[in-house]
Every structure is written in structure tokens, then in C-alpha cells.
Image: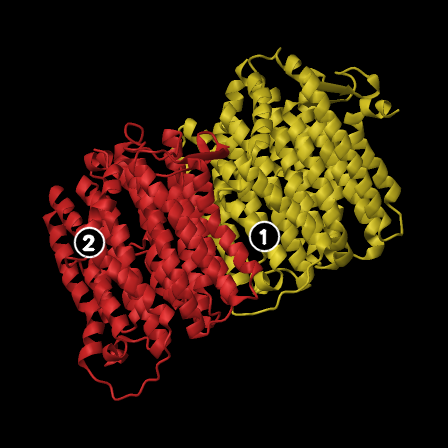
Amino acid sequence: MSNSFLIILGIITPLFAALFSYVCRYNNNLRDSFGIIGGLITFVISLKIFHGIQNNEVYQITFFTLFDGVDFAFKVSALGSIFSLVASSLWILASIYTIGYMRGAGEKNQTRFVIFYSIAIHAALAIAWSGNLLVLFIFYEILTFSTFPLVGHKQNAESQSAGRLYLSILVGTSLIFFLPAIFWIWLKTGTLDFQDGGILMNKFPAEYLSFLIAMLVFGIGKAAIMPIHRWLPAAMVAPTPVSALLHAVAVVKAGVFSFLVVVVYIVGPDFLIQTKSSDWLVWLACFTIMASSIIAITKDDLKARLAYSTISQLSYIILGAALASSLALKGASFHIITHALGKITLFFCAGAIYVTAHIKKVSDLKGMGYKLPLIFFAYTLGALSIIGVPPFIGSWSKFYLIMGSIEREFIFVAIILGISSLLNIYYLLQPVVIGFTQNSKKEIKLIRAPLTVWPPLITGLGCLVFFFYANYFLNNISGVIVN
Amino acid sequence: MFDIFLDDAPALVVVLPLLISAIIAFMPSKIWPWIISIFTLLLHLFLSLHLLKEISVSGLIIYEFGNWEPPWGISFKIDGVNIGLQLLFSIFVLVSTFYSRKIFLNEIDYRDSGKAYSLWLLAVGSLNGIILTNDIFNLFVFLEISALASISLIALGAGQNRKALLAAFNYLIIGAIGATFYVIGVGFAYAMTGTLNMNDLVIQLAQYSDGQLAIFAGMSFMLIGLMVKAAIFPVHIWLPPAYSYAPSAVSTLLAALATKTILYFFVRLLYEVFIIYPSYLSLFLDFVLYPLSLLAIFIGTVIAIYQDDIKKLLAFSSIAQIGYITLAFSLKDHSGVASGFVHIFNHALIKGGLFMAVGYFAILYKDRVTLNSLKGFGYKYPITSFALLICGLSLIGLPLTNGFISKLYLFQALYTNQMYFSIALVAVSSALAVVYFWKIVEQMWFSEVKFKSEKEDAYIYLPIWIVTISIIVFGIYSTPIIEFSNLSADYLISGYQN
């Protein structure tokens, strides 16, 4: 199978999954199976591409020219191969989980849900493999629009206003900041292609670079850096599979991935370090990390707490990109994988608790640990990974980020990362502590939904197992950073 | 036997609609005027395509009326500058005529149908004359015919809202002042040179190589007159009420094509005739047109944000968009003029599509469309609403729509001319365009009001979608528009460099 065909197949498979789900909408089992099948196919393709990238193979395809110097083209970068691998592998598990959750929670309009879910994955994969910044932008918008019906899925007043906030922040920032930034880059360089080492060096005036970085980081609203973070907690009204796969993996990771790609392949880390244009962003990222951790502590709603935790964790990646040293970039890229694995576990668990016991709040979890031991076990694994305790995979990315900040002589940043880990321990493990130590007198009727339990267990154990295989991923990541 | 007609194609594209308009004026029927108009315009399109074929062979057609040679007789000129516009004109007029039937049936007395289509064809013929004519006085004639036809068409909106009469009257007075200015300028030019033919004018003006006060006065009069007609800020005040109170089909035609044809002639006059006084030209472009364009862009956008009436909002957005076009034309180089033409094409499609969709909403809502009245329309009329969404995103300049291509080339042209302030201003006003368009989107999709979807009329949404799809097609495959615009710029700018 030729390399370019592989890309096309990978990108259209989710669309076909959506189409088949629609065709088979009257047969629930058949309809929902296409998510799993599509996930398997895209996973195999992503894995093949991932290995191909390791062996220096080139995956690219150009369809047509949009305008001077910019084609509608896909080209898989090392960074993209990581993102697509994460998104597609977790799609399989999320599809299984979706079946359990949607039926367990008795949600309506399941066909529409499955269709837009697949389209969102399509957009995420296209972002991962996009060949230039404009193609990335196009699919970035498609991702926003395709997830909007998912956020507003419940169609009540709350989800309406959440959907509105979601769309207006994401579309607004991208049109007002991101698109003009793309124009600016194109005017200065005449191209938007991703190249190792960046395209701006010697072409873009260094004194305006921090301005450009600001337009990009605020324009890519999906990266959820403060003050453009409000959409993420609002989006938590969506059914949990959306929060799990999209708002812990595909959408937010598409955001930070876009920013990382810009730093690595457009601006160029060397140029960034030379001009110190992103040093201000380091501080903003640190602020976001701390502020959202503190907000997370105050949240009693488990999903809202996880959402703020996500904001904080996304800023780790922004922080790594802003530091732009090779170790920091390594940590940031790796954090895409580790956080995805950890956070999807937590969301899976939150949803599983909701489906089985109809509990949303942390304070209501009293005694639940004994009733739902598997879920709490998986939750603990995921939480420990995000906190960064060895031997969990999350410890690697945090390690590299701290090393990176020391490399750039931002000692204060290393301290912030440490404090943030302490806060993580508090707000992520508190539910576990409550679940196992306090007893509730209330009788809670449990509705078992096994399909919601196995996916978090798998990802949770993955956090543990992949700690020992980190090199497998780091090989590809090392290819990202060209010094 | 068609060859006889085809030889006269340049004249026929103008004369045919004018003739037919006289025939259908008193037809009492409800549908025949429309059918005849459609066939006329199909023929019109056929003739335009024939002209395109001829041009691609010969590159230039000078058509002499009655075989009177210029400079004595009136002549039409078709070359690379206007052939693209001619084609766009032909196609868009056909689509909007197709669209207009159901709209007219709803908005005006059906007994007026014959009159309406008579005026419609009159406007079409005379606007087409503006595109083709090579004679400055002949242009005045076409300007007046088109103005009177459009004014009467606007006044037809009085059945819906009496303010249409006031709007038409405003247009009449201000348009007449503009035309008077223009014709005074023509008088000066004729007095000095004794010619009205544009090619000959260039030759005759050369004898006053240093320029003369009378010449400059004449030129200024002509330009100001055309600025009024093209609704360039600050002499645009007739446009918003005229567009917003006219029957929706008329707004579509006017917004998409009327100002565009005049802008075309405006730029042709600048770069083909007045070019022989480079110092005068750069004075006008740098100190009049350029600042006015920036003001138009900014003020038009800001006023649009505060509009409640959607048609008015679109009209003010048109003022800003005309500002983009004139800004591009004021750049005095190939990239600028080309990007101006690109935006003429693209904006004609975008604004046409938007007015079509809003016009349909006006009929469905049976009242003026305000922000408030759009509540829940996204669910109630999904087909038209979605078209409106795409047109609006194109107006903002989202990639994969033709509006993006316009913005891109405009930015590039400004960048090569190192006009960073203008780039910033255009960027800011693009961002502001997001604001006013978002207000519409919010009402349509995110209001509390809930509706079940209702049946929409295919006769109306089909033309809307034709325009919408062309917006996407030209956003992805922009080559034809770019080629035509480059061709136009080649012709005009080659004169500048000589």
C-alpha cells in the first residue's frame, strides 16, 4: 500500500464510519460497531505511519493548489504521527465506552452523537497529518463545528448556552487572532509549509515575534490558556464520552498540538530561544497552571474539577513549547501522550460513576470506593500518572519539562511544576480518599454497566505499563527536535 | 444565420434587454414577463460567452455603432479588462432573475409584474452598457437609465414599507447630483478636446501635457460624480436606505452588480485616461481615495455592528466592502488593481448570496428582518440558513471560501506596497465583521426560541445555493477569478507603465 494512499485511507475512514452509522441507524449494535471498526482501522494505519516515520519514510500527498505557495496537502510529521496514534487508539476504547455510557445513561439522539463523534475524529486526524498551517486551520474549524452538536447534545438551556460559549470563543479567537497570524506568516515567507527548524528564521522581524506568538497562542483557543479557557469547563455539559475523548484528548490536544507544531515547524525553536520572544508566555503558562489548579480544588463537581485540571495540564505543554529547549519540547510532546492516557482514564471513571451510581459530586462519593472497586482502582492509576509518580508514564513528561526549564535556567518554573504536582495530589486523589474512608448512610441503587468499566481499566493499566516502554515513543519525539 | 447576430453581439447584450423591456412593460400576465426575461437573459449569457470566445482569439473588440468610426460615432470596447466582469454580470443576472419571481410575487402587486420586469431588464441593459461603453457621454446616458430604472424598482418596495419612497427619492436627488457632476466634467473635457471617445480622449489630452486647470477641474467633476454613484464614503448616504427598502430581489441585483459596474468604469477612467497626468492621479489616489477607503472600511463596519435591520446591516457592510475595493485600486500597481478586481467578483457573489437569503427570510417572516426576528430561523429554515452561514463566513474571510482569497490578495497587495497601517486596519475591521455576523448567527441558532423545520421553496433556495456553491468552488479553485483579475490588471497597468 503506497504511503499517500495510507493517509487518504486514514483520514476518510472516520467519515465512512459516520456514513455507515447513519445508514445502519435502525440497528443500534451495528451502528455503534462502526466506531470500533473505524478506530481499529485508523489505529493500524496510525501505527504503521508511526513506525514508518521512525524509519524515515515520507508520508505526503498534495491534492491541489489553494493559492500561491499553499497547497491542500497532507504530510505526516513526527509530531503528527504521535498525535494521530493517541487519537486513534483511544478512539477504539472510547467507542466501546460510548456504547456502555450512552445506553446506560439512556441518552437520546444516539445516532447523531455517533456521527458527529466520528467526524470530530476525522478532523483531529486531518489536523495531525496536515501539511501546512492553512490545512491545519481548516480542519481546526471543522473540529470546532463538528463538536458543537456534541456539546449541545442534551438540548436543554444549560447545554444551549454552553454550546454558544464554546462556539463563540473557539471560532471567534481563531478568526480574530489565528487567521491573521497565518496571513502574516504567509506574507513574510510566502509559504505555510511545515519544515524542520521552522520557516521564519531570517524572514520574520524578530522584534514582532512575541506579538505573533501572542496571536497564535490566543488564536488557538483550543489550547485553553487563560484567559481563553472558559469554553472548556462549559463544554463539560456534554455526555462523558465527549469529555473523555474530545475534551481530554482530541480537541484540546489538537489545540496544544497546533501550537507545538507552530513552534517546532513554523517559528523554529532556535529562533524562539534566540529572540526570547516566548519568555512572557512561560509566565502566563505558569499562571494558568497555578490558577486552574487552585480553581480545581474548589470544584465539587467531578467533571468540572477534571476540566480545570485539563486546563492546567494543557499549560504544561504550552509551557514546554514556550521554553522551546530540546528537553522541554520533548517533555511537551510526550505530555500529549501521557496526559491523554491519564485524563481519559479519569473521565472514563467519572462517567462510569455517573452511569452506575448517578453521582456527579466529589462530596457524594462517600463510601463508593467499596462498591465500585474497579472504577476507583482505574481512577487511582490515572490520577497517579497525571500527578507524575513513578512508575507511571506521566512522570516522564514531567521529568523532561522540569529538566527543560532548568536547561533554560528558569528555576522558578521548575518550582512551580513541583507545587502544581502537590496540588494535583490534593484535588485528584481527594475523591479516592473520600471514596474509601468515609461511609455514607444513603442507600444507592447501582446500575452496572460493564462496558464503562473496562476501558478505564485498560487505559489506567496502560499508564503503568507504558512507563517501561517510554523509549518507544521517545524515539519518534527525538526526531521532532532538530537542534 | 446566427452569424449576423453574433457579429453584433457587443451591441445586442445591451440592446436586447432594453428592447424586450419595452415589449413586456404592459403585459398583464403574472408569469410571462418572467419567462420572457429568463429567455432574454439566457440569450444574453450566450452572447457573453460568444464574446469571451472572440476575445480569447482577438484580444480586443471595438464595436462601432452604425459603422460611424470613432471618435465621431459611439463605440463599445471589449477587452481583457471587462470581459470577466461581463461574464459574471451575465451569469449573476440570470441567477437572480430566476430567484426574483417568487420574491416579486410576494412583495409587489402581481399586476405590476410586467412593469417590474420591464424595469429589471432596463436596469440590466443599462448596467451592461456601463461595462462595455468606450464613450464618456454614452456612459452618462447609461448611468441615468440605470439610475432611473433602479429608482423605480426601489420605489416598488413601497407596497411593503412606505419608507421605500423616501429612499428612492433620496437616491433620485443624490444620484442626480452625482450625474450632474459627472456630466459637467464631461462638458469640460469636450470643450477642451472636442472628443468623447475614451481612446481619442487620451490622444487629445496629450496636447495639454502640463495639464490645465480646466482639464483638472473636469476630471475632478467626473471622478466625484462617479464616486457618488459608486457609493464611496462619504458620499454613500443614498445606498443603505435604497438597498434596505427596495424589494429583496432588487436589493440583490443592485448590491451585487450596480456599484460594481460603476467601480469598474471608475478604475478604467483612472488608469486608462487620467493616467497621462501621473501627478494628478497620484494626488487623487493617495490623498483622496486612499484615506476615504480606510474610513469607509472602518466606519462602514462599525456602523454595521450597530444595525438592527439585517438588510441595513448588509448595506453598511457593502460600504465597507466597497472600501476594500477602492483601497486596492488606490495602490497604483498590478497587485493592487488585480486584488481590487478579485474582490469585485467575490463580493458580488457574497453580497448577492446574503441579500438573496435575507430576502427570502423577509418573505417568510412577512415583515422587515431584524436581528430579533431571526430567532430560531436556523432550525426553522435550515436550508436557507445554512447558505446564509456560508456566505457570511465568506464575508468574514474563512478559508475555503472566496472571501478568503479576496482578503489574501488584498493583504498581499498592501504588503508589497508596505502599507502596514492599512493591513492592521483591514485586519481589525475583518475582526469586527466577525462581531456583526456573529450577532446574526447567535439569533439564528442559539436563541431560546425553538421551531420545527418548515418546508422551504426550492425555486428560491436553489438560486441561493447556486451562489453559495460558487462561493465555495471559487474559494477552493480560485484560478478563474485570479486569471480574469490579472488580465484586467495587465491591461490597465500596462497603460500606467508606458
Mark 1, other Cα within 10 Å: few <14 / some 14–19 / many ≥20 = many
Q: Which residue is labeled 2 in the image?
A: A467
Q: Amino acid at mark 2?
A: Phe
Q: Position of residue B71 (x, y in %)?
A: 75, 16
Find out whether the residues at labels 2 and 1 contact each other: C-beta distance under 8 Å.
no
Q: Nearer the viewer, residue A91 or B382?
A: A91
Q: Residue at x 33, y 69 (%)?
A: A453
Q: Is residue B170 visible?
A: no
Position above or below: A234 against A57? below
At x 70%, y 31%, the residue is B130
Output the letter for the chain in red.
Answer: A
Q: Position of residue A206 (x, y in %)?
A: 26, 33
Kindly identify which residue carries mark 1.
B388
Question: Which one is closest to the eye, mark 2 or mark 1?
Answer: 2
Q: Nearer the viewer, residue B309 or B431?
A: B431
Task: Tell whether B29 sits left or right of B475.
Answer: right
Label 1 is found on which chain of the structure? B
The amino acid at mark 1 is: Leu
Label 2, label 1: how many angstroms apart (C-alpha)? 51 Å
- Image height check: is B497 above or below A94? above
